[in-house]
Amino acid sequence: MAQKRPSSDNQASDSKGRQVEDNHGLVQHCDRLEDLSNSLHQELSTLRRVSIRKQNSIDSLQQKLSELRHQNQELEEQLQECQARILKLTFANDLSDTTVIQEFVRIRDNLSNWCEGLPDIIYYSDSDLRGALEGFKCCLQITQDLDTHAQMLLEAQSELLMHITFCRLWRGFLQTLIPGISSSDEALLRELYAGLLSQQSGEDSESAKIWKWSTRRAYVACQRYEKRMNEECINIIDDLHNLFSWFDFGGQVNWANKMARFIEDILKPVVGLVTQISNSSAYYGWQWYGEAFFPERVVRKYHLEQFIVQDSRTHHRIRVANFESLPDETPVGELLIVIFPALFRCANNGHEHLLLEKAVILTRVVEEVPSQKISEKRS
């Protein structure tokens, strides 16, 4: 029995050693946990400080954003006030209808005098007239056959040449909203203006009008506009030279002096007028009247109030007072041509355009309109 004790002592010793090792391991594990806890605590503290700083930055940015929004609102209100003042000032100092009328009438009178100063055409043929008009590349505003035009060269040469020449000026400068503008540029401006209107309420439509007016003025002020206008002036002079070269005049014409006068008295005033119109906030338009306004090409008494009617024989205006006691349907004569178009100031929002100057028409006054035409009209 005494021999078995050492074995028991060894077992007790081993058990005690393992317990010491386990305790030591637990202590080390606890130390690591404590270190980890301290590390996490430090990281959390760091994150908390960073979060506080970030939140302070966010709060500061939000405050600045709020201030900027407030400033932006104030600037928008100031901008609207400035635009309203500019618009009022613009309209107050804008091109007046009276100025437009006076300039147009002056151009019309100068062109009349210029054409009347040409010698009579002593020889022409239908083929000459056809070639002249086709080469001129300018459609007349009354649909007649060339024989009728050729006949008018005999009795109303000046008026026909006035009409042809003004048609060329109208095509070059007056037909478009902004003379000299290319079709692509005009389409772009229309698209931008339509897009601007679609983004604004009715109350802000004045801003769109200011933009459109300012854009037109900017285009007119650019070199491209000036270049195109100069090119068109050269083209018009060349076309007139080609037109008149088809006819034999009864006297010598100093075409250099004649064209120099045309440039000074007609072409430059036209360019000046259309430039003023393009810079204006108002819009002006021209109305040619076709044969639908003159059934059977008969000019009647009521036309004397709607148009400036000239007698092809006397070249004077026919007054409505001469037919005062007659019915409105009373025939006055036969329409030959609409010499000059009517001038209107275009209205917005569905309002009617304002007539500023009546169209000028030429009539062959007759003692009696053929009974066939009268009966056809009444039927």
Image (tube, rainbow, N blue to C red):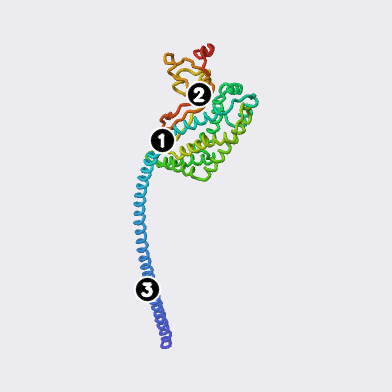
The residue at 35%/52% (across/down) is: 71
CB-based contact (under 8 Å), mark 3 and mark 2: no
Mark 1, secondary structure of its residue? loop
Quarter of the image with the N terminus is bottom left
**Pointer 1 and pointer 2: residues touching (CB < 8 Å)?**
no
Which amino acid, mark 3?
Glu
Disc 1/disc 2 C-alpha distance (Å)? 26 Å
Among numbered discs 1 and 2, the one appearing first in the sequence: 1
Give above or below for 296 relative to 180: above
Compared with 77, 170 (above or below) is above
Which of pointers 3 and 2 indicates the residue nearer the eye?
A: 2
166 and 102: which one is in front?
102
| Residue 194 image point, x, y percent | 46, 39
Q: Please report the residue visible at 54 percent of the width from the left and 12 percent of the height from the top.
A: 372
- Within the image, what quadrant is residue 129 found in? top right
What residue sits right under mark 3 in the picture? Answer: 34
For mark 3, give the secondary structure.
helix
How far apart are the alpha carbons under marks 1 and 3?
92 Å
Q: Amino acid at mark 1?
A: Ser
Q: Give the answer, above or below, for where 43 lies relative to 340.
A: below
User: What residue would you read off at disc 1?
Assistant: 96
Q: Position of residue 180 (x, y in %)?
A: 53, 39
Q: Position of residue 103 (x, y in %)?
A: 46, 34
User: Dividing the picture into quarters, in which one does residue 352 lie?
Assistant: top left
Disc marking residue 361: 2
Residue appearing at x 41%, y 35% in the figure: 96
Q: Is residue 58 above or below residue 3?
A: above
| Position in image of residue 196 (x %, y %) | 44, 42
Q: Quote the CA–CA distance across marks 3 and 2.
A: 110 Å
Helix, strand or loop at mark 2? strand
Q: Is residue 71 left or right of residue 264?
A: left
**Mark sitting earlier along the chain (1/3):** 3
